[in-house]
Image (tube, grey):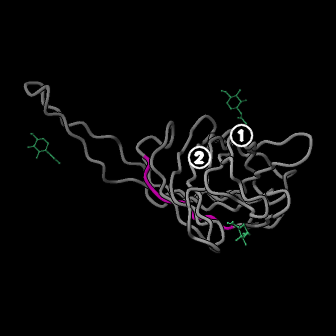
Amino acid sequence: MAKTCQLVMLSLLSFSAFISVMAEHQPFMSNASLKGKKQTHLRFFWHDTLSGSNPTSITVAKPSNANTSAVFDFGFVNVFDNPITEGPELESKLLGRSQGFYTDASQNTEPFQVLFSSLNFAFTEGKYNGSTVTVLGRNPILSTVREMPLIGGSGVFRFAEGYALLHTHRFNPQTRDAIVEYNIYVWHY
Ligand SMILES: *[C@@H]1O[C@H](CO)[C@@H](O)[C@H](O)[C@H]1NC(C)=O
Ligand SMILES: *[C@@H]1O[C@H](CO)[C@@H](O)[C@H](O)[C@H]1NC(C)=O
Ligand SMILES: *[C@@H]1O[C@H](CO)[C@@H](O)[C@H](O)[C@H]1NC(C)=O
């Protein structure tokens, strides 16, 4: 496994404690500094498998006038519970699961189909075990690199903010199976 395929977790700044400066005589005027966050870079591969006997991604809605020759069609909805792994192979180290849905939300944007993607990442490895982050946004799947906002997190990633860069590693237009590389830059305490 190439070193670049490892989950990179770089803490660039030292931990900064949550500072409460609420005065006892001002119970409704508490405030806290959101400064002093550190950055963590998470890199992993997301496996969206629709084909075969054990799909982890299923189409739950399709427009009645679906264009069968198009790879994606405006209005379809897929729900997934996908594994995320350290390397591009499904057999590489499992880091957690990605649960959510995506829908084709673009009507007239050929050849750039645009998904609306909503993903929770629930990590099960190391110090991130039990922590989650949520990525939500516009996903023009034919662009080489897509950027989506990271809108929050839990556990280690409480108060998280950041962004995700998506790059399709492999896509099969017949089955619509995809392997997508995620690089997530997250600022948190
Ligand atoms: C926190 O609240 C106190 C009391 O209202 C105020 O004086 C102070 O400027 C506030 N600090 C910040 C960073 O908002
Ligand atoms: C159906 O999809 C194909 C392939 O994307 C496209 O060439 C064609 O124009 C579409 N037909 C309609 C009616 O939208
Ligand atoms: C992750 O946490 C769960 C629940 O606490 C625990 O059962 C599991 O063994 C942990 N996994 C790893 C790899 O530490």
How crowded pointer 1 is (Cα within 10 Å; few <14, some 14-19, many 20+) is rated as many
The residue at the point 53 percent across, 46 percent down is: 134
Question: Which residue is labeled 1 in the image?
Answer: 81
- Residues at discs 2 and 1 in contact (Cβ within 8 Å): no
Question: Residue 46 got which mark?
Answer: none
The amino acid sitting under disc 1 is Asp
Seen from this angle, which residue lies furthest right?
53
- Mark closer to the chain start, 2 or 1: 1
State the SS at label 2.
strand
Question: Which residue is labeled 2 in the image?
Answer: 119
The residue at the point 49 percent across, 59 percent down is: 163
Q: Is mark 2 within 8 Å of ligand 3?
A: no
Residue nearest the observer in this picture, 171 or 149: 171
Q: Position of residue 21 (x, y in %)?
A: 19, 37
Q: Quadrant of residue 53?
A: top right
Residue nearest the observer in this picture, 161 or 77: 77
Q: Position of residue 57 (x, y in %)?
A: 75, 44
Query: Ligand 1 falls in which quarter?
Result: top left
Answer with left or right where residue 174 lies relative to residue 141.
Answer: right
